[in-house]
Protein backbone atom coordinates (compact mmCIF):
# COMPACT_ATOMS: atom_id res chain seq x y z
CA UNK A 1 0.00 0.00 0.00
CA UNK A 2 1.67 3.19 -1.23
CA UNK A 3 0.09 6.57 -0.44
CA UNK A 4 1.43 10.11 -0.67
CA UNK A 5 0.22 11.24 2.76
CA UNK A 6 -0.01 7.97 4.68
CA UNK A 7 2.58 5.49 5.86
CA UNK A 8 1.56 1.86 6.29
CA UNK A 9 3.47 -0.81 8.16
CA UNK A 10 2.64 -4.44 8.83
CA UNK A 11 3.06 -5.65 12.42
CA UNK A 12 2.77 -9.28 13.56
CA UNK A 13 1.35 -10.23 10.15
CA UNK A 14 -2.27 -9.44 11.06
CA UNK A 15 -1.94 -5.85 12.36
CA UNK A 16 -1.61 -2.85 10.05
CA UNK A 17 -0.28 0.44 11.41
CA UNK A 18 -1.45 3.47 9.43
CA UNK A 19 0.30 6.79 10.09
CA UNK A 20 -1.04 10.18 9.02
CA UNK A 21 2.20 11.44 7.52
CA UNK A 22 2.25 15.23 7.12
CA UNK A 23 4.11 16.18 10.33
CA UNK A 24 5.26 19.52 8.89
CA UNK A 25 1.61 20.72 9.03
CA UNK A 26 0.59 18.70 12.11
CA UNK A 27 -0.87 15.99 9.86
CA UNK A 28 -3.59 18.32 8.60
CA UNK A 29 -5.98 16.69 6.15
CA UNK A 30 -5.61 18.08 2.63
CA UNK A 31 -7.33 16.85 -0.52
CA UNK A 32 -4.66 14.26 -1.21
CA UNK A 33 -4.96 12.81 2.29
CA UNK A 34 -8.71 12.68 1.75
CA UNK A 35 -8.13 10.58 -1.38
CA UNK A 36 -5.59 8.41 0.43
CA UNK A 37 -7.80 7.71 3.45
CA UNK A 38 -10.86 6.98 1.32
CA UNK A 39 -8.80 4.64 -0.85
CA UNK A 40 -7.27 2.90 2.15
CA UNK A 41 -10.54 2.25 4.01
CA UNK A 42 -12.40 1.07 0.92
CA UNK A 43 -9.53 -1.20 -0.09
CA UNK A 44 -9.31 -2.76 3.37
CA UNK A 45 -13.07 -3.35 3.37
CA UNK A 46 -12.96 -5.12 0.03
CA UNK A 47 -9.58 -6.86 0.31
CA UNK A 48 -8.40 -7.11 3.93
CA UNK A 49 -6.02 -9.96 3.12
CA UNK A 50 -4.25 -10.97 6.30
CA UNK A 51 -5.18 -7.76 8.12
CA UNK A 52 -7.34 -8.34 11.18
CA UNK A 53 -6.89 -5.07 13.08
CA UNK A 54 -5.75 -1.52 12.21
CA UNK A 55 -3.93 0.99 14.40
CA UNK A 56 -4.22 4.62 13.27
CA UNK A 57 -1.68 7.19 14.52
CA UNK A 58 0.03 10.41 13.47
CA UNK A 59 3.60 11.24 12.53
CA UNK A 60 5.68 13.30 14.93
CA UNK A 61 5.09 14.04 18.59
CA UNK A 62 3.03 17.24 18.43
CA UNK A 63 -0.25 16.25 16.82
CA UNK A 64 -2.36 13.31 15.83
CA UNK A 65 -4.15 15.55 13.34
CA UNK A 66 -4.81 19.30 13.30
CA UNK A 67 -7.97 18.87 11.20
CA UNK A 68 -8.60 20.20 7.71
CA UNK A 69 -5.70 21.96 5.98
CA UNK A 70 -6.87 25.59 6.22
CA UNK A 71 -3.93 26.86 4.16
CA UNK A 72 -5.06 24.71 1.24
CA UNK A 73 -8.65 25.87 1.79
CA UNK A 74 -7.75 29.56 1.84
CA UNK A 75 -9.26 31.07 -1.31
CA UNK A 76 -11.04 27.90 -2.40
CA UNK A 77 -14.15 28.40 -4.50
CA UNK A 78 -17.39 27.10 -3.08
CA UNK A 79 -17.48 24.35 -5.71
CA UNK A 80 -13.95 23.18 -4.88
CA UNK A 81 -14.65 23.31 -1.14
CA UNK A 82 -17.82 21.24 -1.53
CA UNK A 83 -16.08 18.70 -3.77
CA UNK A 84 -13.33 18.31 -1.18
CA UNK A 85 -15.87 17.97 1.61
CA UNK A 86 -17.73 15.27 -0.32
CA UNK A 87 -14.46 13.35 -0.45
CA UNK A 88 -13.97 13.79 3.31
CA UNK A 89 -17.54 12.62 3.96
CA UNK A 90 -17.05 9.48 1.88
CA UNK A 91 -13.81 8.71 3.68
CA UNK A 92 -15.46 9.06 7.08
CA UNK A 93 -18.34 6.77 6.11
CA UNK A 94 -15.82 4.24 4.76
CA UNK A 95 -14.02 4.33 8.13
CA UNK A 96 -17.29 3.82 10.01
CA UNK A 97 -18.31 0.96 7.73
CA UNK A 98 -14.93 -0.79 7.86
CA UNK A 99 -15.49 -4.34 9.17
CA UNK A 100 -12.02 -4.43 10.74
CA UNK A 101 -11.54 -2.86 14.18
CA UNK A 102 -9.57 0.40 14.16
CA UNK A 103 -7.71 1.61 17.26
CA UNK A 104 -6.67 5.27 17.38
CA UNK A 105 -3.21 5.71 18.96
CA UNK A 106 -3.35 9.44 19.57
CA UNK A 107 0.20 10.76 19.79
CA UNK A 108 -0.68 14.45 20.17
CA UNK A 109 -3.37 17.06 19.73
CA UNK A 110 -6.52 16.36 17.65
CA UNK A 111 -8.61 19.27 16.45
CA UNK A 112 -11.58 19.55 14.11
CA UNK A 113 -11.45 16.81 11.53
CA UNK A 114 -8.66 15.16 13.51
CA UNK A 115 -10.98 14.69 16.47
CA UNK A 116 -13.76 13.56 14.14
CA UNK A 117 -11.39 10.98 12.66
CA UNK A 118 -10.56 9.43 16.02
CA UNK A 119 -14.27 9.50 16.92
CA UNK A 120 -14.81 7.31 13.86
CA UNK A 121 -12.38 4.73 15.26
CA UNK A 122 -13.56 1.91 17.51
CA UNK A 123 -11.63 3.04 20.55
CA UNK A 124 -8.90 5.46 21.54
CA UNK A 125 -5.63 5.40 23.46
CA UNK A 126 -4.17 8.89 23.94
CA UNK A 127 -0.87 10.30 25.11
CA UNK A 128 -0.82 12.30 28.33
CA UNK A 129 -1.21 16.01 27.70
CA UNK A 130 -2.96 15.72 24.34
CA UNK A 131 -5.69 18.27 23.74
CA UNK A 132 -8.84 17.85 21.67
CA UNK A 133 -11.41 20.27 20.25
CA UNK A 134 -14.16 20.63 17.71
CA UNK A 135 -13.22 24.23 17.01
CA UNK A 136 -15.29 24.84 13.87
CA UNK A 137 -17.81 27.25 15.48
CA UNK A 138 -14.92 29.66 15.97
CA UNK A 139 -14.11 29.50 12.26
CA UNK A 140 -17.53 30.29 10.85
CA UNK A 141 -18.50 26.68 10.14
CA UNK A 142 -19.56 23.67 12.22
CA UNK A 143 -18.30 20.10 12.59
CA UNK A 144 -19.04 18.59 9.20
CA UNK A 145 -17.54 15.10 9.25
CA UNK A 146 -19.64 13.38 11.85
CA UNK A 147 -18.70 15.28 15.00
CA UNK A 148 -22.24 16.38 15.83
CA UNK A 149 -23.29 12.72 15.69
CA UNK A 150 -20.29 10.86 17.10
CA UNK A 151 -19.32 13.19 19.97
CA UNK A 152 -22.77 13.02 21.66
CA UNK A 153 -22.59 9.24 21.42
CA UNK A 154 -19.20 9.29 23.13
CA UNK A 155 -19.70 11.89 25.87
CA UNK A 156 -23.47 12.47 26.02
CA UNK A 157 -25.69 15.16 24.52
CA UNK A 158 -25.21 17.93 27.07
CA UNK A 159 -21.43 17.63 27.23
CA UNK A 160 -21.20 17.50 23.43
CA UNK A 161 -23.32 20.65 23.07
CA UNK A 162 -21.06 22.48 25.48
CA UNK A 163 -17.89 21.39 23.67
CA UNK A 164 -19.17 22.07 20.15
CA UNK A 165 -20.91 25.38 20.84
CA UNK A 166 -18.03 26.85 22.86
CA UNK A 167 -15.36 25.34 20.54
CA UNK A 168 -13.19 25.01 23.64
CA UNK A 169 -10.37 22.48 23.90
CA UNK A 170 -10.29 19.71 26.49
CA UNK A 171 -7.58 17.34 27.67
CA UNK A 172 -7.10 13.63 27.04
CA UNK A 173 -7.64 13.11 30.75
CA UNK A 174 -11.02 14.87 30.55
CA UNK A 175 -11.86 12.82 27.48
CA UNK A 176 -11.15 9.65 29.44
CA UNK A 177 -13.35 10.77 32.32
CA UNK A 178 -16.19 11.47 29.88
CA UNK A 179 -15.88 8.17 27.98
CA UNK A 180 -14.29 9.40 24.74
CA UNK A 181 -10.80 8.05 25.48
CA UNK A 182 -10.32 4.47 26.65
CA UNK A 183 -6.89 5.00 28.18
CA UNK A 184 -4.40 7.82 28.74
CA UNK A 185 -0.82 6.57 28.68
CA UNK A 186 2.80 7.47 27.94
CA UNK A 187 3.04 5.42 24.74
CA UNK A 188 -0.36 5.03 23.05
CA UNK A 189 1.09 3.31 19.98
CA UNK A 190 2.68 0.60 22.10
CA UNK A 191 -0.55 0.14 24.06
CA UNK A 192 -2.65 0.06 20.89
CA UNK A 193 -0.36 -2.50 19.27
CA UNK A 194 -0.61 -4.76 22.32
CA UNK A 195 -4.41 -4.61 22.19
CA UNK A 196 -4.45 -5.07 18.41
CA UNK A 197 -2.36 -8.21 18.77
CA UNK A 198 -4.88 -9.66 21.24
CA UNK A 199 -7.77 -8.83 18.90
CA UNK A 200 -5.92 -10.33 15.92
CA UNK A 201 -5.50 -13.62 17.79
CA UNK A 202 -9.27 -13.98 18.13
CA UNK A 203 -11.47 -15.37 15.37
CA UNK A 204 -11.56 -12.60 12.72
CA UNK A 205 -15.10 -13.36 11.54
CA UNK A 206 -16.30 -13.22 15.15
CA UNK A 207 -14.61 -9.85 15.69
CA UNK A 208 -16.15 -8.39 12.54
CA UNK A 209 -19.64 -9.67 13.29
CA UNK A 210 -19.48 -8.42 16.88
CA UNK A 211 -18.33 -4.96 15.72
CA UNK A 212 -21.20 -4.84 13.22
CA UNK A 213 -23.74 -5.89 15.84
CA UNK A 214 -22.55 -3.24 18.31
CA UNK A 215 -22.46 -0.43 15.77
CA UNK A 216 -25.86 -1.05 14.19
CA UNK A 217 -27.43 -2.17 17.45
CA UNK A 218 -26.87 1.27 18.95
CA UNK A 219 -29.09 2.74 16.24
CA UNK A 220 -31.95 0.34 16.98
CA UNK A 221 -34.40 -0.22 19.79
CA UNK A 222 -33.33 -2.92 22.23
CA UNK A 223 -35.39 -5.79 20.81
CA UNK A 224 -34.50 -5.03 17.17
CA UNK A 225 -30.83 -4.73 18.11
CA UNK A 226 -31.03 -8.06 19.91
CA UNK A 227 -32.56 -9.75 16.86
CA UNK A 228 -29.92 -8.21 14.58
CA UNK A 229 -27.18 -9.53 16.89
CA UNK A 230 -28.70 -13.04 16.84
CA UNK A 231 -28.63 -13.01 13.02
CA UNK A 232 -24.99 -11.94 13.13
CA UNK A 233 -24.31 -14.73 15.65
CA UNK A 234 -26.04 -17.37 13.53
CA UNK A 235 -23.77 -16.64 10.57
CA UNK A 236 -20.81 -17.80 12.69
CA UNK A 237 -22.21 -21.15 13.77
CA UNK A 238 -21.17 -23.13 10.70
CA UNK A 239 -17.81 -21.46 10.06
CA UNK A 240 -14.51 -23.34 10.12
CA UNK A 241 -13.28 -21.00 12.86
CA UNK A 242 -16.21 -21.87 15.13
CA UNK A 243 -15.47 -25.60 14.74
CA UNK A 244 -11.77 -24.93 15.32
CA UNK A 245 -12.49 -22.87 18.44
CA UNK A 246 -14.54 -25.65 20.02
CA UNK A 247 -11.95 -28.30 19.09
CA UNK A 248 -9.11 -26.23 20.49
CA UNK A 249 -10.99 -25.66 23.74
CA UNK A 250 -11.63 -29.37 24.20
CA UNK A 251 -8.08 -30.29 23.20
CA UNK A 252 -6.69 -27.62 25.55
CA UNK A 253 -4.62 -25.84 22.89
CA UNK A 254 -4.49 -22.44 21.24
CA UNK A 255 -6.89 -22.19 18.27
CA UNK A 256 -5.61 -21.57 14.75
CA UNK A 257 -8.18 -19.23 13.26
CA UNK A 258 -8.16 -18.65 9.49
CA UNK A 259 -11.09 -16.32 8.97
CA UNK A 260 -13.20 -18.97 7.27
Image (cartoon, rainbow, N blue to C red):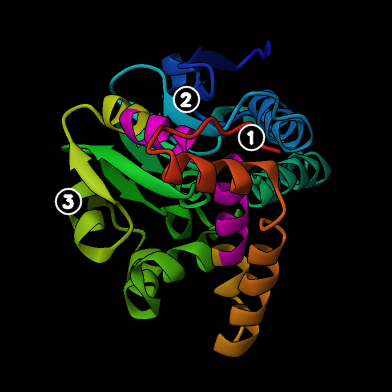
Of labels 2 and 1, the one closer to you: 2
195 or 144, which lies in front?
195
How many angstroms separate mark 2 from mark 3 (CA)? Answer: 22 Å
Q: Are marks 2 and 3 in contact (CB under 8 Å)?
A: no
How many angstroms separate mark 2 from mark 1 (CA)? Answer: 15 Å
What residue is disc 1 on? 73
Which contiguous range is marked in magenta?
Answer: 194-213
Q: Residues within 10 Å of mark 3 (few under 14, many from 20)?
A: many
Q: Are marks 3 and 1 in contact (CB under 8 Å)?
A: no
SS under mark 1: helix
Quadrant occupied by the N terminus: top right
What residue is disc 2 on? 27
Of labels 3 and 1, the one closer to you: 3
Residue 196 magenta-drawn?
yes
Q: Residue at x 63, y 34 (%)?
A: 73
Does label 2 or label 3 sit earlier along the sequence? 2
Of labels 2 and 3, the one closer to you: 3
100 left or right, relative to 194: right
Amino acid sequence: MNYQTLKTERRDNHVLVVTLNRPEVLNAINTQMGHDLYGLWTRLAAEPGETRCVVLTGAGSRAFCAGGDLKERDGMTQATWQAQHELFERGFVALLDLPLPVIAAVNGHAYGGGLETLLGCDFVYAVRGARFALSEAGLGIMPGVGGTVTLPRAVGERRAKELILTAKAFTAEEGAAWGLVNKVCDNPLEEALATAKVIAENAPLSVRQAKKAIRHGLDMDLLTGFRFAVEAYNRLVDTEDRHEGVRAFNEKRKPNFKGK
